[in-house]
């Protein structure tokens, strides 16, 4: 998942990641990310960022 890799390896904010991944808004990315991964993007980043 591209958004997960970006959350792990960049300091981009969630809005920027959403745009780069083709989502219309960060809210839409958050919704789909949490549904797919089970946690919100910010929690994922806190756990897996380098």
Image (spheres, rainbow, N blue to C red):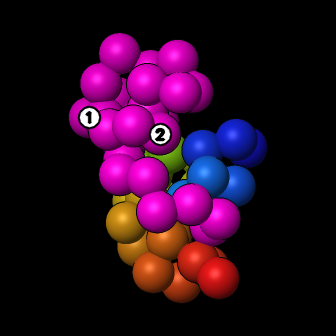
Residue at 61% x, 52% y is: 6
Mark 2 or mark 1, whichever is nearer to me:
2
The foreground one among 12 and 22 is 12
The residue labelled by disc 2 is 17
Asked whether the residues under the numbered discs 2 and 1 touch, taking CB atoms below 8 Å apart as contact, a structural biologist would say no
Residue 11 colored magenta?
yes
Query: Residue 26, how many percent across, how many down?
Result: 30, 35
| Highlighted range, magenta | 8-32
The answer to whether residue 31 of the structure is visible from this angle is no
Query: Residue 34, how many percent across, how many down?
Result: 45, 51
Main SS, magenta region, reads helix
The answer to whether residue 19 of the structure is visible from this angle is yes
Residue at 49% x, 71% y is: 45
The residue labelled by disc 1 is 27
In-image side of 17 versus 26 (left or right): right
Quadrant placement of the C terminus: bottom right
The foreground one among 9 and 36 is 9
């Amino acid at each position: 998942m591209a958004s997960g890799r970006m959350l792990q390896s960049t300091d981009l904010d969630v809005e920027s990641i959403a745009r780069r991944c083709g989502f219309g808004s960060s809210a839409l990315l958050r919704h789909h990310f949490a549904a797919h991964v089970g946690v919100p993007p910010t929690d994922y980043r806190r756990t897996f960022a380098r």
